[in-house]
Amino acid sequence: MPVQVLKMKLNQKPNGFSFIEVLLSLLLLTVFSYWGIKTLEEQKQRILYANQEIEITAITEEIRRILTNSQNCAISFQGKRPTTEVGAINSIQRLSVFNGRENSQARFPTFSMNGQTYGEGKLKILSYELSDQAYDVGNEDRSTELLIKFDRKNTAPKGKPTESVEKIKIYYLLNSSEDRQTIEVCSLSPIKEVLETWETDPTHNRLIYTSGAVGIKVDLPTSKLDINGPIQFGDSSDKQECNFELRGQLKKATTTQLVLCDGVKWINLTN
């Protein structure tokens, strides 16, 4: 073979990639794959964190709905101080009626109570606290704030807070017979407004409700007086004649006789 042809063959680049080129390609592929996977994980975490915002709002609104019932509010915070008292409240209490009996059910317990988490992001409720430190609460209008602290460490992206605190304003009346000054009555509406719906009439020895309907063991009364349970009448010694002013009055005339005034006479309802 001529020397010139041999030199040309030696100078030619072999077909395919060299070993070093393959290694560099694999290295770049690994770097881009890692970056892509990390980016996807961060995006997924941001979506989960955003979903938690919705879940926190939903839990807070459900707690607010429960506490709208003043009975639930009272059993949740009765005996608690309206100032900061960490660890005194482990859940929100809700009254329910089963087989004619009232029961108290714990709702949204803290994580320390039973390890329960909430929602897709496994939200933890760390604590409930009553605090009078906010600028718009205090003794003047007898109000405090319920602080609901959520743990978000599992989903918080870099730079985002790992805890969230939601607030619900609560109005109260204190049990003045105790030295600790604890809550006796509470409501999500100003207590003053609640009390103003009742008027006393000492002259005629009566108490008058001036707004809406009254419900006894009923969350949403559908008539002026809505009672969930039996009504008991005592034997009446009142022998007053039925007249137009007494129409609609119902009373127990004897041990076995219930009567209704139709505006003219008493009608026996037990026949």
Image: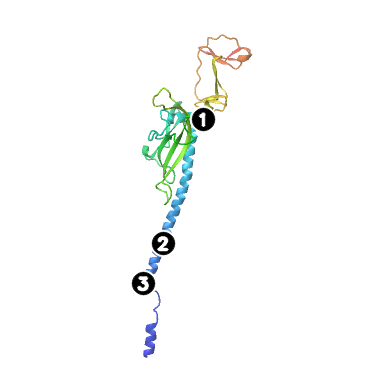
Residue 136 lies, in percent from the top left, at 49, 35
Q: Residue at x 44, y 56 (%)?
A: 40
Residue 101 lies, in percent from the top left, at 44, 26
Q: Give the label on residue 105, or none.
A: none
Q: Earlier in the sequence, mark 3 or mark 2?
A: 3
Residue type pointed to by label 2? Ser
Secondary structure at badge 3 equals: helix
Give the vertical position of 69 relative to 246 (above or below). Answer: below
Secondary structure at badge 2 equals: helix
Task: Quadrant for residue 10, please give it.
Answer: bottom left
Give the vertical position of 237 relative to 46 (above or below). Answer: above
The residue that label 3 is drawn on is 20
Q: Residue at x 38, y 83 (%)?
A: 11
Q: Earlier in the sequence, mark 1 or mark 3?
A: 3
Residue type pointed to by label 3? Ile
Task: Quadrant for residue 16, please give it.
Answer: bottom left
Q: Nearer the viewer, residue 262 or 168?
A: 168
Direction bottom: furthest residue? 2
Secondary structure at badge 1 equals: loop
Whether label 1 touches label 3, CB < 8 Å: no
The residue that label 2 is drawn on is 33
Instruction: Give neighbour class at mark 1: few <14, some 14-19, many 20+ (Cα, 10 Å).
Output: some
Q: Earlier in the sequence, mark 2 or mark 1?
A: 2
Instruction: Give neighbour class at mark 2: few <14, some 14-19, many 20+ (Cα, 10 Å).
Output: few
Residue 236 lies, in percent from the top left, at 52, 11
Measured in 3D between alpha carbons, the distance from the residue under mark 2 to the one under mark 1, in whole angstroms, is 59 Å
The residue that label 1 is drawn on is 190
| Residue 96 visible within the image | no
Q: Residue at x 44, y 53 (%)?
A: 44
Residue type pointed to by label 1? Pro
Whether label 2 touches label 1, CB < 8 Å: no
Give the vertical position of 138 relative to 118 (above or below). Answer: above
